[in-house]
C-alpha cells in the first residue's frame, strides 16, 4: 500500500501545562483535530499534497484560536498584516504573500501567486492588487479582531518590544502550518501567520519566506516552521533541514533536530517545525515548552499534542 501522511502545527511557544484551563486546552485540541481529519480525508481520497496542505491551513486560518487569518495578532499601528507561503516539492514551485490585509485565507492567495503569476512572492499593495484582480473579498478589520490578542497588544504597544503571541502567559498561540505526503509520492508545505504582536509596520517574518519558514523538495523533505521569525530567517531553517539531508545524508529526524535543538538555539532562536519526507517519516521538534501539533498517517498513527511528550 502507498503511504500517505499529514502533519500540522498551530504555533510553538511558552506553553506550560497548568497555565491553561482544561476547556481551553480542549478547544485547541478539537480545532487541531478537525483540521487534521478534514485534511486527512482529502488525502485519503487521492488529494494532492498541495491541496491537502492548503486545506489544512485554511481550516486553521478560519479558527480564531490561532494567529493566522481570523485571530491574527496586532501590529504596532493596531492593524493586522498577514504572511503566507506554500511550496510544491514535486517541482519546486512556490508562492508567497506578505503584509496583506483583509484577506480571509492568505494561504490561498499565496497559492494563486504560484499558479497565476510568473513570480513567487508578492508584497503589500501589489499583493492586494493581485487579490482584487482575482475577485478576492476584502474583509473589514473587525473580522480579524480577537479580544485576547488586542489585550496582548495593548500591554506592549507603547514599548519598542514585539513578541511571539506565544510568549505571554495565558496567551493564544500561533502561526499555523501543514506538511503532507500524498498517494502519488509528492510532498508539500504551507505556512500562514499574523506575525508577531506589536511588530513594526512592514515587518516581514520567516513564514512567507521560502527557505526560512517553508520549504519542500521531493528529494529531501517538506518543512513548515514556527517561532521567532528573525532567527528563522537568519538560520534559513526550513532549507537547512533539507540541506543537511541532501548534502550530509542525515535522516529527517536527525536533520530537523540538529537545526532546532542546536543551530537555531546557538543563535538564540526559539520555536519548532513540522516535516515529512517521501518515505512517510514525520518529525515535529521544538525547543520551546510546547508546540500545538498533530499528525495522521495511512499506517494508523494519529497524534494531537501540545506539550513535550
Ligand atoms: N514565525 C512567525 C513570525 O515570526 C511567528 C510565529 O511562528 O508565531 O512571523
Image: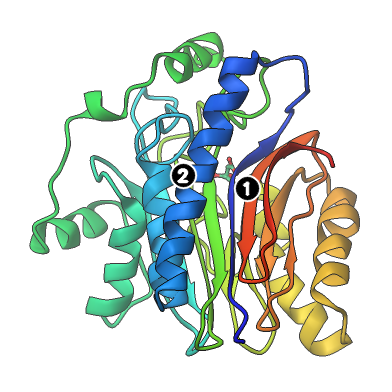
Badges 1 and 2: C-beta atoms under 8 Å apart? no
- Residue 141 seen by the camera: yes
Other residues around mark 1 within 10 Å, as few (<14) / some (14–19) / many (≥20): many
Secondary structure found at label 1: helix
Q: Residue at x 82, y 88 (%)?
A: 247
Q: Position of residue 175 (x, y in %)?
A: 53, 43
Residue 262 position (above or below residue 26):
below
Q: Residue at x 51, y 78 (%)?
A: 182
Q: Which residue is mark 1?
A: 229
Q: Position of residue 276 (x, y in %)?
A: 67, 71
Viewer-proximal residue among 105 and 154: 105
The circle drawn on residue 34 is 2
Viewer-proximal residue among 38 and 63: 38
Q: Residue at x 87, y 59 (%)?
A: 263
Other residues around mark 2 within 10 Å, as few (<14) / some (14–19) / many (≥20): some
* Left or right placement of residue 15 versus residue 70 in this view: right
N-term-proximal mark, 1 vs 2? 2
Residue 179 position (above or below residue 270):
below
Q: Residue at x 67, y 16 (%)?
A: 20
How many numbered marks does the figure carry? 2
Which of the 4 quarters of the picture holds residue 4? Answer: bottom right
The circle drawn on residue 169 is none
Tell me: is circle 1 under 8 Å from ligand 1. yes
- Please tell me in which quarter of the rendered image ligand 1 is found: top right
Name the image quarter holding the N terminus.
Answer: bottom right
Viewer-proximal residue among 260 and 74: 260
Q: In whole angstroms, how far apart are the C-alphas of marks 1 and 2?
A: 27 Å
Viewer-proximal residue among 228 and 292: 292
Secondary structure found at label 2: helix
Amino acid at each position: 500500500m502507498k503511504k500517505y501522511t499529514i502533519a500540522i502545527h498551530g504555533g510553538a511557544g511558552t506553553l506550560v501545562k497548568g497555565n491553561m484551563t482544561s476547556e481551553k486546552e480542549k478547544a485547541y485540541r478539537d480545532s487541531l483535530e478537525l483540521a487534521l481529519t478534514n485534511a486527512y480525508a482529502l488525502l485519503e481520497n487521492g488529494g494532492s499534497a498541495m491541496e491537502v496542505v492548503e486545506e489544512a491551513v485554511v481550516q486553521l486560518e478560519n479558527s480564531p484560536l490561532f494567529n493566522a487569518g481570523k485571530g491574527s495578532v496586532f501590529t504596532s499601528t493596531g492593524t493586522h498584516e498577514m504572511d503566507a507561503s506554500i511550496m510544491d516539492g514535486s517541482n519546486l514551485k512556490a508562492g508567497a504573500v506578505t503584509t496583506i490585509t483583509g484577506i480571509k485565507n492568505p494561504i490561498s492567495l499565496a497559492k494563486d501567486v504560484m499558479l497565476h503569476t510568473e513570480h513567487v512572492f508578492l508584497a503589500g499593495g501589489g499583493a492586494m492588487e493581485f487579490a482584487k484582480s482575482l475577485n478576492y473579498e476584502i474583509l473589514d478589520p473587525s473580522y480579524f479582531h480577537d479580544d485576547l490578542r488586542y489585550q496582548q497588544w495593548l500591554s506592549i504597544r507603547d514599548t519598542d518590544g514585539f513578541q511571539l503571541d506565544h510568549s505571554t502567559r495565558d496567551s493564544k498561540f500561533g502561526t499555523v502550518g501543514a506538511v503532507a505526503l500524498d498517494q502519488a509520492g509528492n510532498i508539500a508545505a504551507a505556512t500562514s501567520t499574523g506575525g508577531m504582536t506589536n511588530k513594526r509596520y512592514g515587518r516581514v517574518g520567516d513564514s512567507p519566506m521560502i527557505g526560512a519558514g517553508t520549504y519542500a523538495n521531493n528529494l529531501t523533505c517538506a518543512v513548515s516552521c514556527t517561532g521567532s521569525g528573525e532567527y528563522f530567517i537568519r538560520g534559513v531553517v526550513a532549507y537547512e533541514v533539507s540541506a543537511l539531508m541532501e548534502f550530509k545524508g542525515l535522516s529527517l529526524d536527525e536533520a530537523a533536530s540538529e537545526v532546532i535543538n542546536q543551530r537555531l538555539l546557538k543563535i538564540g532562536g526559539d520555536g519548532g517545525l513540522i516535516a515529512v519526507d517521501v518515505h512517510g517519516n514525520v518529525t515535529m521538534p521544538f525547543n520551546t515548552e510546547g508546540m500545538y501539533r498533530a499528525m495522521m498517517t495511512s499506517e494508523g498513527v494519529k497524534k494531537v499534542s501540545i506539550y513535550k511528550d
